Amino acid sequence: MRIVILPDAADVACFAAQELAGIVRGKPDAVLGLATGSTPLGTYRHLIEVHQAEKLSFRRVQTFNLDEYLGLSSNHPASYRHFMNEHLFRFLDIPLEQTFVPRGDTSDVEGECQAYERRIVEAGGIDCQLLGIGSDGHIGFNEPGSSLASRTRVKTLAERTRLDNARFFASLDEVPTAAITMGIGTILEARQVLLLATGQGKAEAIREAVEGPLSSSLPASALQLHPSATIVVDEGAACRLQRADYYRLAEQQRRRLRKEA
Ligand code: GLP
């Protein structure tokens, strides 16, 4: 794993946006896996700036979001479809029919999950999957205990996750109790993964994901199995890492080698 420690959340957002923009520059029909939550908001703002400043086109890009609350329709203000339209898609030139988010209000949940997996395969697989991390170490909505081989399916939300996400709803009672989420197996098939975390509230989850044992009890630790995973954290989220000095050294060397090349 590549661990990038940056001074603050703005640097994390800038780094991630440059990575995503670089992928689209190199492959105009790239398939991007996208995430919701507060963490990627800055990344999306930067990406919109790059799109506008450089005229970087997303016309041929396809996107797949990690998850959606079960029972919420796409126009519910707390749905992830609504979040993506509001914070990213409406500012880009990407046709909305090339943006996929699981349908939370489907009457055929099993069929929706299978169709989602099929669509990812038909698109040629995900080039880069953006991820946040829950305070309990979840990725997407793969709560602790999720099979490391899991595919898109329904997961019951942990109470801690419902509490963490209650700020997006009028009250805790309104937070759905389940979600459709890509599985950990699905996420691991992306050609590249980029996990972002900011703030001390994520420090323990990051320490366990990066330096703890590989375990379904800490779903993000599954990224230890991925051949091309980059974890981008600010100083707050990095503060519990035992080998932070080594990661900084490795990044310095990486930059030096790139300059020499
Ligand atoms: C939700 C999402 C995750 C996200 C997590 C953390 O649970 N399903 O994909 O990583 O929230 O969100 P935040 O970035 O707001 O801390």
Image (tube, helix red, strand yellow):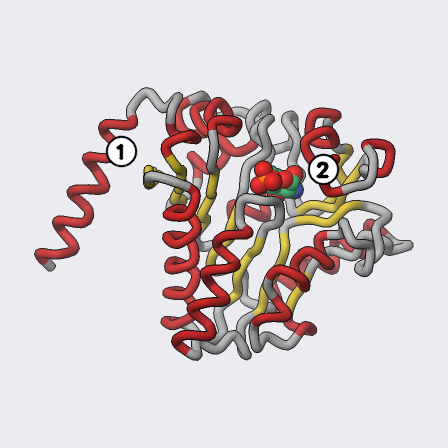
Residue tagged by mark 2? Answer: 167
Q: Is 261 drawn above or below residue 153 in the view shown? A: below
Q: Is 155 drawn above or below residue 28 in the view shown? A: above
Mark 1 nearby-residue class (10 Å; few <14, some 14–19, many ≥20): some
Tell me how many marks there are: 2
Q: Residue at x 32, y 20 (%)?
A: 242
Residue tagged by mark 1? Answer: 247
Give the residue type that dot 2 points to. Arg
CB at mark 2 closer than 8 A to ligand 1? no
The residue tagged with tag 2: helix, strand or loop? helix
Return the residue found at the far left. Answer: 260
Question: Which quadrant of the view contains residue 260?
Answer: bottom left
The residue tagged with tag 1: helix, strand or loop? helix
Q: Which quarter holds ligand 1? A: top right
Looking at the rendered image, the quarter that the C terminus falls into is bottom left
Q: Is 92 drawn above or below residue 197 in the view shown? A: below
Residue 108 % position (x, y): 88, 54
Q: Residue at x 50, y 52 (%)?
A: 42
Give the residue type that dot 1 points to. Tyr
Q: Could you say which is closer to the camera, residue 86 or residue 240?
A: 86
Which is in the foreground here, disc 2 or disc 1?
Answer: 2
Residue 116 % position (x, y): 70, 58
Q: Are marks 2 and 1 in contact (CB under 8 Å)?
A: no
Disc 2 and disc 1: Cα gap in Å? 34 Å
| Horizontal side of residue 209 vs 145, given as left or right | left
- The answer to whether residue 261 shows anywhere in this view is yes
Looking at the rendered image, the quarter that the N terminus falls into is top left
Q: Residue at x 86, y 55 (%)?
A: 106
Residue 239 % position (x, y): 38, 24
